Image (cartoon, helix red, strand yellow):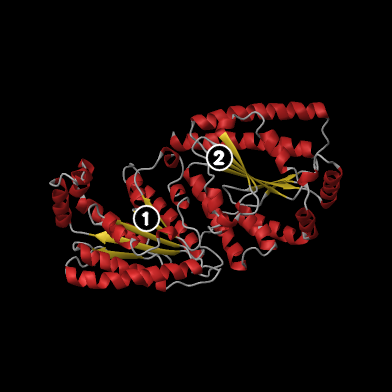
């Protein structure tokens, strides 16, 4: 893509001044239309050092109402970002519906910076490209317009701009020894960047390479590129691609079912086994922290299946500084204006920490499916999207445990009635619980399909009979201990 870029194009100042105004006005009009249609937009500007990225961003921003845009200038990651997956910081910056996110550099610069320094950089580049393509496809499928511009300059022009900056006291700080080192390896990085561009130029997020030896030409072409992309927008809740299925196909396995009704435990046995498992889990937490291994534990289940009580027992002996419980209800209006995965990925644990989700992204294929809160295409897509984000987290070095607590209709009714009669528990029962119970068969169909399509080799569903709460709690805590031990062994073998 870089070799085909014409670096000789030039525009004089008069032509630039004449054309800039109408283009800016057009962009402002498009922003208002997209805001009204609640279509999110991502504009990212990449390029060689000194290619004019900041100047191009500055010119584009002039066209927009600043109340509807968010600019992200991407440099080295913060401490929080450094201890989470590469794309976590960018999920946090995606725009709401009707908003525009502009990136002065983006996940591409960070991917190159963080992969090419590693001995096994070729494999890491391949992994980064796969992750980026998934990320962009998920956003595009959710109706996000993605505009990607790369500003290309020659090595000679880059050298000239570096020297000009260094000789000016006001801009000399902009050129670092690292910039000159990168300049010296221009020919080395040229094919790598070209390959990166080709392999990440997709139908939902294509690249436009602009010759930027002439700054005025680059800015005008950037205006035209953004306008053309926004005018091609396709509205509709099913996303730009309109696909029901993403392309990712994981290794699926049957859910691990522990649904047989175990023998009733006496209180003394229950308390001893639970205490032993809790003590072991506290030790496992310390080792996971020392090894920088993050863990996600997901709890799903029928209403009144005992998720809250099980989570309380699970965390009893854990260090509260090392875990977070994230209770999930229906999304608020701000969350609805974002991709459905956004509110969950934001709560990812940092390395060595644990996040426990009390309900999760699986609401997309359960309550949102059954209650009609999303379209068929959206919940059909979600199986692959969820598998992808789980595999991304696992590949980064984390562990994922997924529990489904199952309760029989008879036991659920008994618990509902008990909650209604007990003043201290009446807050736990709502009209929505009764409505969900009336749709038992519809939820059963959704649950079975969820198991079928998201119980993967690396993140299988663990189904636990919770008619007996004591047994369910012990089984859950012991299972987490066993998983943590296996996770530590796998990571030790991987890095030894």
| Residue 10 seen anywhere in this rendered image of the structure | no
Label 1 residue SS:
strand
Q: Quadrant of the N terminus?
A: bottom left
The spot of residue 55 in percent (x, y) is 26, 57
Residue mark closest to the camera, 2 vs 1: 1
Question: Is disc 2 surrounded by few (<14), some (14 to 19) or many (20+) residues within 10 Å?
Answer: many
Q: State which quadrant residue 439 falls in.
A: bottom right
User: Is 55 positioned to the left or the right of 416 in the image?
Assistant: left
Q: Quadrant of the C terminus?
A: top left
Residue at 59% in and 51% down: 456
Of residues 220 and 24, the one nearer the viewer is: 24
Q: Mark 2 or mark 1: which comes first in sequence?
A: 1
Give the answer, above or below, for where 292 lies relative to 431: above
Residue at 46% in and 38% down: 494
Residue at 80% in and 44% down: 426
> Residue 295: which numbered mark, if any?
2
Q: CA distance from mark 2 to mark 1?
A: 30 Å
Q: Which residue is mark 1?
A: 103
* Total numbered circles: 2
User: Is 382 positioned to the left or the right of 392 in the image?
Assistant: right
């Amino acid at each position: 893509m870089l070799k085909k870029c014409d670096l000789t194009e030039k525009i004089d100042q008069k032509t630039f001044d004449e054309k800039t105004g109408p283009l800016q006005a057009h962009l402002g009009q498009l922003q208002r239309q997209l805001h009204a249609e609640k279509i999110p937009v991502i504009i990212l500007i990449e390029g060689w050092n000194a290619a004019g990225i900041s100047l191009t961003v500055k010119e584009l921003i002039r066209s927009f109402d600043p109340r509807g845009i968010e600019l992200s200038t991407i440099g080295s990651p913060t401490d929080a970002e450094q201890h989470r997956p590469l794309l976590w910081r960018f999920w946090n910056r995606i725009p709401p519906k009707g908003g525009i996110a502009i990136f002065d550099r983006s996940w591409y610069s960070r991917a190159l910076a963080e992969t090419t320094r590693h001995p096994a950089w070729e494999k890491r580049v391949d992994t980064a490209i796969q992750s980026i393509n998934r990320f962009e496809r998920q956003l595009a499928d959710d109706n996000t317009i993605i505009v990607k511009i790369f500003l290309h300059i020659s090595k000679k022009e880059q050298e000239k701009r570096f020297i000009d900056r260094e000789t000016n006291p006001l801009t000399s700080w902009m050129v670092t020894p690292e910039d000159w080192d990168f300049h010296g390896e221009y020919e080395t990085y040229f094919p790598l960047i070209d390959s990166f561009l080709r392999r990440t130029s997709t139908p939902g997020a294509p690249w436009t390479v602009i010759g930027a030896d002439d700054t005025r030409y680059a800015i005008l072409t950037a205006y035209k590129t953004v306008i053309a992309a926004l005018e091609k927008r396709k509205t509709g809740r099913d996303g730009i691609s309109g696909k029901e299925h993403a392309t990712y196909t994981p290794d699926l396995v049957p859910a691990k079912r522990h649904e047989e009704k175990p023998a009733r435990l006496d209180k003394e046995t229950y308390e001893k086994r639970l205490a032993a498992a809790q003590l072991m889990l506290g030790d496992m937490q310390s080792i996971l922290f020392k090894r920088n291994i993050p863990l996600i534990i997901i709890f799903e289940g029928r209403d009144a299946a005992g998720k809250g009580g099980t989570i309380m027992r699970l965390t009893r002996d854990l260090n509260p500084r090392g875990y977070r419980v994230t209770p999930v209800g229906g999304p608020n209006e701000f969350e609805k204006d974002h991709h459905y995965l956004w509110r969950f990925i934001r709560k990812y644990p940092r390395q060595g920490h644990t996040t426990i989700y009390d309900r999760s992204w699986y609401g997309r294929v359960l309550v949102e499916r059954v209650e009609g809160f999303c379209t068929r295409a959206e919940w059909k897509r979600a199986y692959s999207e969820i598998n992808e984000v789980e595999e991304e987290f696992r590949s980064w070095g984390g562990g994922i445990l997924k529990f489904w607590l199952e309760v029989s209709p008879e036991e659920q009714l008994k618990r509902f009635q008990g909650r209604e009669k007990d003043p201290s528990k009446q807050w736990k029962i709502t009209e929505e619980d009764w409505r969900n119970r009336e749709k038992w068969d519809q939820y059963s169909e959704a649950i079975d399909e969820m198991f079928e399509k998201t119980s993967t080799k690396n993140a299988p569903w663990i189904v636990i009979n919770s008619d007996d709460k004591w047994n369910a709690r012990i089984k859950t805590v012991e299972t987490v201990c066993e998983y943590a031990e296996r996770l530590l062994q796998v990571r030790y073998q991987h890095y030894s």
